[in-house]
């Protein structure tokens, strides 16, 4: 069997658990909120004043931390899943 066909048939990621799905939704929400706050920086500055850039910076750091947590947990779930899949053969 060609390698590309074998790779198509082999699962490459673990099924998404409820916890990972929740983390993914939180991460997506943070990304969208960050993008919207950057796009609307002008109106936010009018409303919040000098606090707007600080709030956006906090949102950026929170998004980066959420990204690292999600990627770490997703990688761990995939590794465990593929290890158990390999043992079953």
Image (cartoon, rainbow, N blue to C red):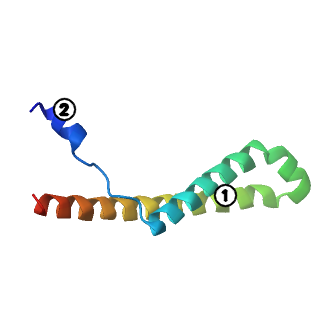
**Circle 2 SS class:** helix
Q: Is residue 12 left or right of residue 64?
A: left
Determine the residue located farthest toward the right in the rendered image: 46
Label count reads 2
Query: Percent x, y for residue 87?
Result: 11, 63
Q: Nearer the viewer, residue 77 or 56?
A: 77
Q: Callout 2: few (<14), some (14-19), or many (20+) C-alpha neighbours within 10 Å? A: few
Decide: is 5 above or below 76.
above
Q: Which mark is residue 4?
A: 2
Q: Which mark is residue 70?
A: none
Alpha-carbon span between mark 2 and mark 1: 44 Å
Residue bearing the label numbered 1 = 57
Which sits earlier in the primary sequence, circle 2 or circle 1? 2
Position of the N terminus by quadrant: top left
| Residue 25 visible, this angle | yes
Query: Percent x, y for residue 37?
Result: 74, 50
Query: Percent x, y for residue 44?
Result: 84, 52
- Quarter-wise, where is residue 70 in the image? bottom left
Q: Nearer the viewer, residue 61 or 79?
A: 79
Kindly report which numbered mark, 2 or 1, lies closer to the viewer in this rendering.
2
Q: Is residue 35 left or right of residue 6?
A: right
Q: Is residue 4 left or right of residue 18?
A: left
**Circle 1 SS class:** helix
- Quarter-wise, where is residue 63 in the image? bottom right
Q: Residue at x 41, y 60 (%)?
A: 16
Q: Residue at x 58, y 61 (%)?
A: 26
């Amino acid at each position: 069997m060609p390698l590309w066909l074998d790779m198509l048939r082999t699962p490459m990621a673990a099924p998404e658990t409820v916890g990972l799905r929740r983390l993914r939704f939180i991460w997506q929400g943070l990304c969208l909120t960050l993008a919207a706050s950057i796009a609307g920086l002008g109106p936010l500055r009018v409303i919040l004043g000098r606090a707007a850039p600080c709030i956006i910076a906090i949102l950026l750091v929170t998004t980066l931390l959420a990204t690292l947590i999600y990627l770490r947990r997703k990688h761990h779930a995939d590794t465990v899943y593929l290890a158990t899949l390999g043992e079953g053969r």
